[in-house]
Amino acid sequence: MGVGCWRNPLLLLVALVLAAKLGYFQRWEGFQEMPMSKKNMNSTLNFFIQSYNNASNDTYLFRIQKLIRSQMQLTTGVEYMVTVKIGRTKCKRSETKNSTCPLQSKKLRKTLICEFLMYTVPWVNYYQLWNNSCLEG
């Protein structure tokens, strides 16, 4: 096959259809459910909770209690749409930023259900929180 065969539009169309059928082109299908594992999303969740704690006016730090739902889509990086349950810890924000602080109990107990949308380019360690909303849970 020489260069001249690509001048035939029908042959070019057949080649493109075959390539698409064989999966040579990436299909971006929007957000897809992903396994609910903290291990897979550890850096994303850490970035979210640090961002939340930095923006919060609460005296105490919060930490993630449970990953409820996670979806992702590939773009120029990776976009995550995540729902988590977070809880107020016994660590004051002025004292420490320890992620293993025990949760509050009794009077100061507070839990929130948060949904966030984050963009990340993990191979260059870039994270950006695009949207975040939390309701008492």
Image (cartoon, rainbow, N blue to C red):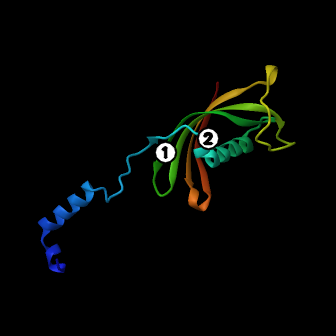
Residue at x-position 57% and y-position 60%: 123
Q: Is residue 34 above or below residue 23?
A: above
Q: Residue furthest right?
A: 95
Find residue 4 and name its label.
none
- The residue sitting at 17% across, 73% down in the picture is 6
Q: Is residue 131 left or right of residue 98?
A: left
Q: Which of 123 and 137 is in front in this view?
A: 123
Amino acid at the residue labelled 1: Met
In this rendering, is residue 32 above or below 85? below
Query: Is 1 in front, or is 31?
Result: 1
Q: Is residue 86 above or below residue 39?
A: above
Rendered image quadrant of residue 75: bottom left
> In the rendering, at what x and y percent does residue 14 appear?
16, 62
Q: Residues within 10 Å of mark 2 (few under 14, many from 20)?
A: some
The location of residue 45, given as percent across then percent down, is 64, 43
Q: Quadrant of residue 5?
A: bottom left
* Residue sitting nearer the eye, 132 or 42: 42
- Residue at disc 1, secondary structure: strand
Residue contact between numbered discs 2 and 1, judged by CB atoms under 8 Å: no
Vertical relation: 54 (above or below) 2: above
Q: Nearer the viewer, residue 122 or 110?
A: 122
- Residue at the spot of label 2: 38
Q: Which residue is drawn at 80% across and 35% down?
A: 60
Q: Name the residue under label 1.
A: 72
The N terminus appears in which quarter of the rendering?
bottom left
| Mark 1: few/some/many CA within 10 Å (<14, 14-19, 20+) | some
Q: Point out the frontmost of discs 2 and 1.
A: 2
Q: How far apart are marks 2 and 1 (CA)?
A: 14 Å
Query: What x and y, as percent, mark residue 70?
Result: 53, 38
Q: What element carries label 2?
A: helix
Residue type at tag 2: Lys
